[in-house]
Image: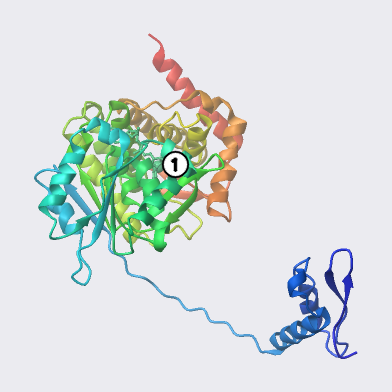
Amino acid sequence: MNRGTSVVNKSEHRPTLIAVPDNDQRCLSATFKICFIPKRIPTDVRFDATNYLFHMTRRFHNLATEPCHSDNVDFSVQFTHRLRFTGDLLGADSDVLADLLESSECRAPRVQFWIDAHVAEANPDIRHRLHIFARRNQQRFQVIGNPQLVPGGESVKNDVHILERILKVLNEADMDRRSYVVVIGGGAVLDAVGFATAIAHRGLRLIRIPTTTLAQADSGIGVKNGVNLFHKKNWLGAFAVPWGVINDRAILDSLSDRDFRCGFAEAVKVALLKDSDFFARILRDAKAIFDRGGECWGVIEESARWHLRHITAGGDPFEMLEARPLDFGHWSAHKLEAMSDFELRHGEAVAVGVAVDTVYSSLVHGFPAEDVDRVLTSLEQLGLLIDHPALQQTEVLFDGLEEFRQHLGGRLTLTMLAAIGSPIEVHEIDRQRMAQAIQIVQNRVLVGRRP
Ligand SMILES: NC(=O)c1ccc[n+]([C@@H]2O[C@H](COP(=O)([O-])OP(=O)(O)OC[C@H]3O[C@@H](n4cnc5c(N)ncnc54)[C@H](O)[C@@H]3O)[C@@H](O)[C@H]2O)c1
Ligand SMILES: [Zn+2]
């Protein structure tokens, strides 16, 4: 037989190939693929299934007989990360923002402002100040509409409809790939608005103005954007390098003490991973930082620079490799946030995670015992709790290990510490020892609470 033959299963109108050209068995694999053409052939485009299968079989036959080709071509793309530090961005230093809003081919760029609703509430004059800023610079750029408000905190990441609304507004404003979205807010708002700008037209220009210590010291500098889905942190997201980031001191004035402390959990984390002198400085200044003294700024700046260095010179900004070296303490932190129904702030959860993984590192990886005390003391003096009731549900907590692995794919890869400034990668966790580490942290808190 020279042609493929088909029969039509009358009940389903599903063509099924029952014979193939018998002179070339290589057609067989193609034949099976052809069997998966649409189950139901719409009546108005009914066609001769025998002919169709014959042509398809020939096509696959040709493909199968062509020699194989493969090309692996390495390439790299140049990015610029623009990080600025200011004292009063919406006042004396507003040119720093204006200078970032570069025009393209002499056309004034379109700019849209997005603000964390809690920031707007705590700074009632912010919209007026942005209006003055826009008017003063109307020759340089065109501000589109009024600043848009989005809910502050994790709720903006937990409701995917907010993402849809952001996208609709960007569309209605005709934002294009040379337009700027300037987002002013905490890490959650930066993540959500940043994700929308990363996917609209495959990427608008994003300028982040982080308004929390955590976002200034850590998340605002990074290249990750995303929202939560399926009750999992950052399940939906994208890597995108922001056009610029401006860390402004004045914008932190309205931040609550609770949120102000959170950023220093990430500063401790990065110091433990990268630089023992930096850690010693945080420990020395911890009480002053707790009181929001001037020592805070140097620590936030140093932490931001470590994150910048990691992204620009660390060799893996988009986390293609197995490890997430900056995520020390984060496997449990992400799980604890979800277990507490996001009542726990990210920075608070990180403090707990860092405490637990530091103790675990001492039990399993030789991290010096005297430094365990220094690390836990630094967190406590910064006003960060190192315990949470959810830690007791160890079985649920340990699901966080698998979720952490899934997020990256491949083997489980966690960062632990051999010493301060000496991170190591590990691929398995001794759960008994981890439970013991949790117990040690909890006992310390209990003892500390005794009168
Ligand atoms: N993209 C990343 O690389 C990355 C890294 C770490 C954390 N994160 C994410 O960041 C989020 C946490 O961010 P966060 O710690 O900045 O907290 P947050 O954004 O949840 O803000 C905390 C609260 O403070 C309010 N707020 C923010 N700035 C304020 C100000 N200046 N004055 C008054 N109120 C203000 C917010 O509206 C919110 O209610 C989490 O979703 C976390 O997953 C992302
Ligand atoms: Zn973090």
Quadrant of the displayed image that contains ligand 2: top left
**Circle 1 sits on which residue?**
157
Which secondary structure, mark 1?
helix
Label 1 crowd (10 A; few <14 / some 14-19 / many >=20): many
User: Is 351 drawn above or below residue 404 in the view shown?
Assistant: above
The picture quadrant where one finds residue 80 is bottom left
From the viewer's perspective, is 331 left or right of 198? Answer: right
The N terminus sits in image quarter: bottom right
User: Is 236 drawn above or below residue 116 in the view shown?
Assistant: below
Q: Residue at x 55, y 39 (%)?
A: 231
Q: 371 or 334, which is in the foreground?
A: 334
Q: 373 or 411, which is in the foreground?
A: 411
Q: Residue at x 27, y 52 (%)?
A: 112
Within 8 Å: ligand 1 and the Cβ of disc 1?
A: yes
Q: Residue at x 53, y 31 (%)?
A: 339
Q: Residue at x 20, y 52 (%)?
A: 84
Residue type at tag 1: Lys
Residue 381, percent from left and from top: 30, 26
Residue lying at the far front in this picture: please name it: 44
The C terminus sits in image quarter: top left
Residue 222, percent from left and from top: 35, 52
From the viewer's perspective, is 392 left or right of 132? Answer: right
